Image (cartoon, rainbow, N blue to C red):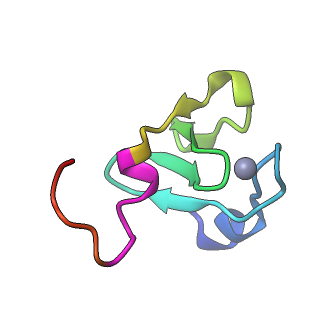
Amino acid sequence: MDKELLAMLVCPLCKGKLKYNREAAELECRYDGLAYPIRDGIPVMLPEEARAMGVDETLHDSPGRTGEA
Ligand SMILES: [Zn+2]
């Protein structure tokens, strides 16, 4: 995926920056907890097409997280 294109993409809901998840081929908005799919190399920037991420996914960068609750 084109890095310059990626840099131009923002979340349609909060206008925030998106994180590209290469493995899942998704663009993630941590703020909204949504993951926008990339289909055939084309980001689908539609909230109704986005996958709701679990709390665990949205927090998986946080330091000091200790195991499962
Ligand atoms: Zn957002």
Furthest-left residue in this view: 67
Furthest-top residue in this view: 48
Residue stretch in magenta: 56-63
Furthest-front residue in this view: 69
Q: In this view, does 41 lie to the left or right of 12?
A: left
Task: Say if 27 sits above or below 54 in the image.
Answer: below
Task: Say if 60 sits above or below 47 in the image.
Answer: below
| Residue at (51% x, 60% y) in the render | 20
Please tell me which residue lies in front, 3 or 63. Answer: 63
Please provide percent x and percent y for residue 2: 59, 65
Residue 37 belongs to the span the image colors magenta: no
Q: Which image quarter: residue 30?
A: bottom right
Please provide percent x and percent y for residue 6: 65, 64
| Residue at (19% x, 66% y) in the render | 66
Furthest-bottom residue in this view: 63
Please provide percent x and percent y for residue 25: 43, 46
The dominant secondary structure in magenta is loop
Residue 57 belongs to the span the image colors magenta: yes
| Residue at (77% x, 57% y) in the render | 10
Residue 1 visible in the displayed image: no
Q: In this view, does 54 lie to the left or right of 23?
A: right
